[in-house]
Image (spheres, rainbow, N blue to C red):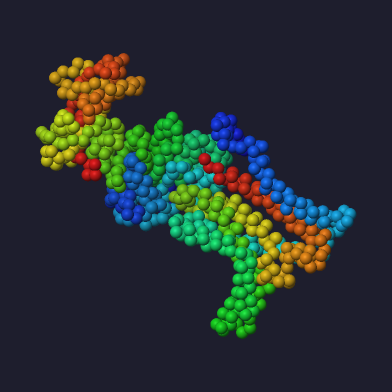
């Protein structure tokens, strides 16, 4: 609670009547908390235990994860792909979010649908669609061949490029939505004021819109990056074994060559990275509240 | 306008037959305006009368469908807002929340690529003028409403534009602060010699601040004049009603003898007043009679001298004056504002039978407004 809220609730106790007591709040949360404890916290703790005890305490699995060149390469590739995907969604998503925030009426509805409908479509379906497009005898290769632009089909599928393009497509809404949420709150009169004071359209963007949308940019980048480092379906379908990412490695270690300890250690690394990013995310949210307070 | 060499006198502003439609709605219907250099002009009118659209057209945020806007005899309608060199204070100030007070005020100078040292000097100077010294490094959210208002003003004049537009800039402030800021803004405007067009729906504010007031109604300008002219010589029933208080009665014109006429109201009584020049209709056409409460006198001995008599139904004490409602008949009640007893006014109490009267030249008769 901020100082202002605290003084408000002290001055107007009646405003708190609608709020729930601590006991009631906990009671309402209990069913979900119990479910989480059972199906989420317990397995995660079990996983941590498997990574660190085999059967006695050991750092062997963690050492393996960060020392074997193959694994290091996979982890670095995952981070690289995730960073490129996050940057790519930002570049493609910002103009869309900007347009959505400015649009009115049916145009706003249409843009919103264009962003949301893919989000509601299964990741599996969208990833398979890319294999149809990119395959050796896929739409793109056939099209280019029949136009006479290429002699032999290009290798498009099972490349890092394919993974990046498909993941940008799948994760784009997770960038557009937080950006839109922030851009929409920037009052139009700020832009008018800047124009009236002599700023060009580009200067209005650089000095007003862009700095005020930083919280949305940070939220979007962190959200996309977190989702990307744990992505499984899309890289597995369009990337293949040569472009393996961490999630595939974990699945392989656990399902195919049952090495539970190592899989658990990798999962822990992934979890810690995610938690670290969530901390940054949380700070970005508080910054947003600071910047959004203009009363 | 050459960058960095700003004018030091206010611009003359001319708006000529401006028309602006939004779909089927005509917001401004051929309004013209001529504002002298260094003049403070208030655009006054009820909400939806087109005053803000007119202001936004001058600023360049709305594009008129017809008409012209001239600054110092140069048409600006084709120029984008960013190239008109006009200062503007928005209703909610529109301060940039991520910039400090100094950063906000420096913005128009940075946009004009002035040297850093000069920017610093000018910002410091204007911060002193608006009495915000020491607050330059604060963020707008850390300031009070009155302080934010001053930052908005400073930011809109630091680049010394020849014209400053203000869109209800004091509407968000409480009454006491608003009255202080009225005096302060007026003083700053005189100091800077800048031309100001100020939009407000508050007639008290318009009368208090403006050299001249333009009253707008339904996209047209009803009257432009000094505050005194508007109050004492309103050109239409709308202006008389919107500026100040009035007793207002609908009736039929019964006679016009020279400039003095009479309106028969409900109950057959004839109220005498000066007929507006716009009265050209024949006898018996609908007309509006108006008289200001302070022009009505109340006598405690109703006699033949006072043609109207009635019973006091309400008394409101307002310090130096007393508002007195007198019910003449069922449909006819007249409010008079008289001096209190202590200041030499009559001794009045509820239920007293009194006579009311006014000099016919202090009352007005207008033709009935087209749409009532």
Q: Where is residue A250 in the image (x, y as percent from the top left)?
A: 76, 63
Tell me: B218 left or right of A43.
left
State the image quarter where residue A92 is shown: bottom right
Q: Where is residue B140 in the image (x, y as percent from the top left)?
A: 53, 41
Q: Position of residue B293 (x, y in %)?
A: 26, 27
Q: Which residue is drawn at 18% across and 32% down?
A: B266
B94 and B254: which one is in front? B254
Tell me: B271 left or right of A139.
left
Q: Residue at x 14, y 36 (%)?
A: B253
Q: Residue at x 43, y 33 (%)?
A: B178
- Please state the total of marks drawn on the protein image: 0
Q: Which residue is drawn at 32% across and 37% down?
A: B211
Against B21, residue B357 (above or below) is: above
A249 and A279: which one is in front? A249
State the image quarter where residue B357 is shown: top left
Visible in this render: residue A131? yes
A23 and B16: which one is in front? A23
Against A17, residue A150 (above or below) is: below
A19 and B18: which one is in front? A19
Visible in this render: residue B228? no
Q: Where is residue B200 in the image (x, y as percent from the top left)?
A: 37, 40
- Which quarter of the image is occupied by the N terminus of chain A? top right
């Amino acid at each position: 609670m901020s100082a202002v809220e605290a003084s408000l609730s002290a001055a107007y106790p009646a405003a708190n009547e609608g709020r729930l007591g601590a006991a009631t709040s906990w009671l309402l949360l209990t069913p979900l908390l119990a479910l989480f404890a059972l199906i989420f916290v317990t397995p995660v703790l079990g996983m941590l235990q498997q990574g660190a005890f085999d059967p006695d305490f050991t750092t062997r699995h963690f050492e393996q994860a960060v020392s074997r060149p193959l694994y290091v390469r996979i982890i670095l590739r995952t981070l690289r792909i995730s960073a490129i995907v996050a940057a790519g969604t930002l570049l493609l998503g910002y103009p869309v979010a900007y347009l959505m925030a400015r649009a009115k009426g049916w145009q706003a509805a249409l843009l919103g649908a264009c962003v949301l409908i893919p989000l509601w479509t299964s990741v599996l379906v969208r990833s398979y669609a890319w294999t149809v497009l990119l395959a050796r005898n896929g739409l793109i290769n056939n099209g280019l061949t029949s136009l006479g632009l290429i002699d032999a089909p290009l290798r498009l599928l099972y490349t890092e490029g394919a993974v990046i393009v498909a993941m940008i497509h799948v994760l784009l809404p997770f960038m557009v939505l937080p950006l839109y949420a922030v851009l929409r709150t920037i009052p139009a009169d700020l832009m008018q004021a800047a124009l009236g004071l002599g700023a060009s359209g580009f200067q209005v963007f650089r000095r007003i819109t862009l700095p005020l949308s930083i919280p949305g940019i940070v939220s979007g980048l962190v959200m996309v990056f977190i989702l990307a480092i744990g992505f499984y379906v899309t890289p597995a379908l369009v990337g293949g074994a040569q472009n393996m990412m961490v999630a595939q490695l974990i699945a392989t270690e656990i399902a195919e060559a049952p090495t539970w300890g190592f899989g658990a250690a990798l999962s822990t690394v992934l979890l810690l990275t995610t938690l670290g990013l969530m901390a940054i995310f949380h700070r970005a949210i508080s910054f947003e509240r600071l910047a959004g307070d203009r009363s | 306008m050459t960058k960095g060499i700003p004018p030091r006198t206010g611009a003359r502003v001319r708006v000529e037959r401006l028309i602006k439609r939004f779909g089927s709605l005509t917001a401004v219907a051929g309004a013209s305006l001529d504002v002298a250099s260094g003049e403070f002009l208030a655009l006054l009118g009820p909400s939806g009368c087109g005053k803000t659209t007119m202001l936004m057209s001058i600023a360049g945020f709305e594009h008129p469908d017809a008409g012209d806007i001239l600054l110092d005899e140069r048409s600006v309608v084709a120029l984008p807002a960013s190239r008109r060199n006009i200062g503007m204070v928005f209703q909610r100030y529109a301060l940039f929340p991520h910039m400090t007070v100094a950063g906000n005020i420096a913005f128009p100078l940075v946009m004009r690529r002035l040297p850093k040292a000069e920017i610093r000097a000018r910002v410091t100077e204007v911060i002193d003028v608006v009495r915000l010294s020491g607050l330059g490094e604060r963020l707008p959210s850390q300031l009070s409403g009155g302080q934010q208002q001053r930052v908005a003003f400073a930011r809109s004049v630091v680049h010394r534009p020849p014209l400053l537009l203000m869109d209800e800039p004091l509407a968000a402030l409480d009454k006491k602060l608003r009255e202080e800021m009225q005096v302060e803004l007026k003083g700053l405007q005189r100091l800077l010699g800048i031309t100001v067009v100020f939009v407000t729906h508050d007639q008290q504010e318009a009368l208090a601040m403006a050299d001249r007031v333009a009253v707008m109604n339904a996209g047209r300008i009803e009257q432009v004049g000094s505050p005194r002219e508007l109050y004492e010589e309103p050109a239409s029933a709308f202006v008389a009603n919107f500026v100040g208080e009035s007793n207002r009665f609908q009736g039929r014109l019964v006679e016009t003898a020279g400039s003095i006429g009479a309106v028969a109201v409900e109950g057959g009584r004839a109220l005498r007043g000066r007929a507006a020049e716009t009265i050209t209709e024949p006898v018996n056409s609908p007309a509006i009679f108006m008289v200001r409460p302070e022009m009505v006198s109340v006598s405690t001995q109703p006699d033949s001298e006072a043609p109207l008599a009635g019973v006091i139904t309400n008394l409101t004490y307002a310090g130096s004056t007393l508002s007195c409602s007198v019910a003449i008949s069922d449909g006819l009640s007249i409010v008079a504002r008289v001096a209190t007893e202590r200041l030499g006014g009559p001794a009045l109490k509820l239920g007293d039978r009194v006579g009311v009267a006014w000099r016919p030249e202090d009352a007005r008769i207008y033709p009935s407004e087209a749409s009532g």
